Image (spheres, rainbow, N blue to C red):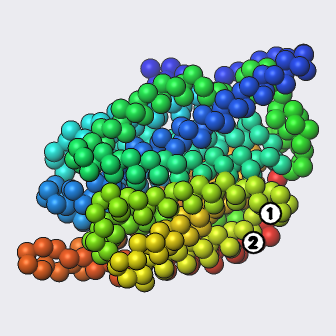
Amino acid sequence: MVNSLLSYFKTGPARPLLSDPVAIHRLYLRKRWSIWLSLIAGYAFFYTCRLGLAVTKKPLLDEGVMTTFQMGIVGSVMLYVYALGKFVNGMCSDHANIRRFMSWALLLSALLNIAFGFTHLFVGFVILWGLNGWFQSIGSAPSVVSICQWFSNKERGTRYGIWAGAHNLGEGMTFIFVAWLVGHFGWRAGFVGPGLICTVVALVLYQTLGDRPQTYGLPHVADYRNDHSAGPPPTESTTVLQKRVFRSPWVWILALSCAFMYVARYAINNWAILFLQETKHYPLTEAGFVMGAYPVMGFIGAAASGWMSDKFFGSRRNLPTLLYGVLQTGGMVLLFVTPPGHRWLDVVAMGLFGFGVGGLIVFLAGLIAVDVMPKAAAGTVKGLIGMFAYVGAGTQDWVSGFLLDSHKTMVAGKAVYDFAPAFYFWIAASGLSVVLAATAWNVKPSE
C-alpha cells in the first residue's frame, strides 16, 4: 500500500518529445498560464487554513478556551511540525507530481480546519493543529519546484516574486474575511469557513495544476525558452544534486537569516491582532482593517521584488534584500512606538512592515538560494530553508507566549499584557536577519 501511495504521488515518466514546434508552443503556453495562476490562487488559499488561530486569539481568551501560553504551545507545535514537513516534503517535491501532491495537501488541511472548529479539548487543538502543519508544509516547495520546471532563469525572478505575493492575498483574506466571520459567528467559524472554501479550491487545483513538462512530451524549459544564462541543465541525478545543496555554506547562512526573519514575520502574523486589541484598544474588525495594510503592501513588495531585481539589478538580489530588510525592521519599530489613537500611523507601519517582509520572503525564503543551486534540487533548497524558517517561527510563538504570559498584570480581575519584551525580541531578530543576509552579498547563480 505504501508503494502504491508513493507511486501515485511520484512524477510521471517522460513522454517522447513532440515533433511539431507549433504544438509544443501551444501546449507550453496553455500549461504555463494554467499552472502559474493555479499556484498563485492555491498558495493564497493555503494561508486561510493556516492563520485562523491568529484571528481568533482574543475570542479564545475571552471565552477561557485557552491562555496565551497555551495558544503559543498550539501555534509552536503547528510550526515545528511544519518546519519538519518543509524539509521532508521539500525533498519529496523534487520527485513528485505537483498536481496531485499539492491539491491533496490542501484538501487534507481543509478537513483538519473543519475538525478544529468542532473541537473542545486542548489536547485536540494541539493534535489537529500539528497535523495541519504537516499538510500546510506541502504548499510552498511544490510551488517553487513547479515554477522552476515551467519558467527559465531570466523570467523566474518575476514569476517567483508574483507567486510569493500570493501568501499576502491569503493573509489579507484571513485578516479581513475570516475576522468578519469570527466577529459575526464566533471563533469556530474562523476554522470551519476557510475549511469549507479550501475543500472546493483543492478540487479545482487537481484539475488545473500539472506535472513537469517532460511528462507531456515537452522539452526542458531552458531549451524551450533558449535561456541557458545560468549554464546548461545539469546531467547529474536529482539525488546527487540534492547532496550539493547540503554542502553549500551559502544555503545554511541564508537559512539562518531566513529563520530570524520568520521570527519577525510570524510575530506580526500571530500576535499583532491581539496587540492592536489589547494595547491600542481596537475592536476586532478594526484591528483586521489595520492588519489589512500588511498583506496588501506585502503583495506589492513581493511582486515588485523579483521584477525589480531582474530588470534593474541583473537578477542579483543583494541590494534589494538589504533595502527590504530595513523597511521590515523600521515598520515594526514604528508600530511599537506609535501611541494608541493614531490609526493611520499604525496602517503606515503595517504597510512598511508588509512591503519589507514581502520582498524578504521572496529573496531569503528561497529565490537567492534557488538561484545559486541546481534547479532540479529546488525543492530540497526550499525545504531546507523552510525548515529553518519555521523552527524560527515556532520558537517565536512559544517564546512570545511565555513573555506575554509572564509580563501580564491583573487589573480589576482582568489580564493586562505588556508587549514591550516581546517587541524587543522581535525587532532584534529582524535586525540580525539583515546582517546575516548581507554576508551572502556576492553569491552567483547556476542552473
Against 89, residue 388 (above or below) is below
Residue that appears at 30% across and 45% down: 181
Against 130, residue 355 (above or below) is below
In the image, is 34 to the left or to the right of 446?
left
Q: Amino acid at mark 1?
A: Arg
Residue that appears at 12% across and 73% down: 414
In the image, is 313 to the left or to the right of 93?
right
10 Å neighbourhood of mark 2: few (<14), some, or many (≥20)?
A: few
Marks 1/2: CA distance?
8 Å
Against 404, residue 378 (above or below) is above
Image coordinates for residue 109, horizontal then vertical, percent: 40, 37
Image coordinates for residue 288, horizontal then vertical, percent: 38, 58
Whether residue 239 is visible to the viewer of this picture, yes or no, is no
Residue that appears at 48% across and 24% down: 203
Q: Secondary structure at mark 1?
A: loop
Image coordinates for residue 367, horizontal then vertical, percent: 69, 55
Q: Secondary structure at mark 2?
A: helix
Image coordinates for residue 268, horizontal then vertical, percent: 43, 66
Whether residue 23 is visible to the viewer of this picture, yes or no, is yes
Screen quadrant of the N terminus? top left
Which residue position holds label 1? 316
Quarter of image, res 226: top right
Quarter of image, res 90: top right
Which residue position holds label 2? 319
Disc number for residue 56: none
Pick the front one: 363 or 391: 363
Do the numbered discs 1 and 2 sit on residues whose CB atoms are within 8 Å? yes
Pick the front one: 388 or 316: 316
Residue that appears at 66% across and 49% down: 162
Q: How many marks?
A: 2
Q: Amino acid at mark 2?
A: Leu
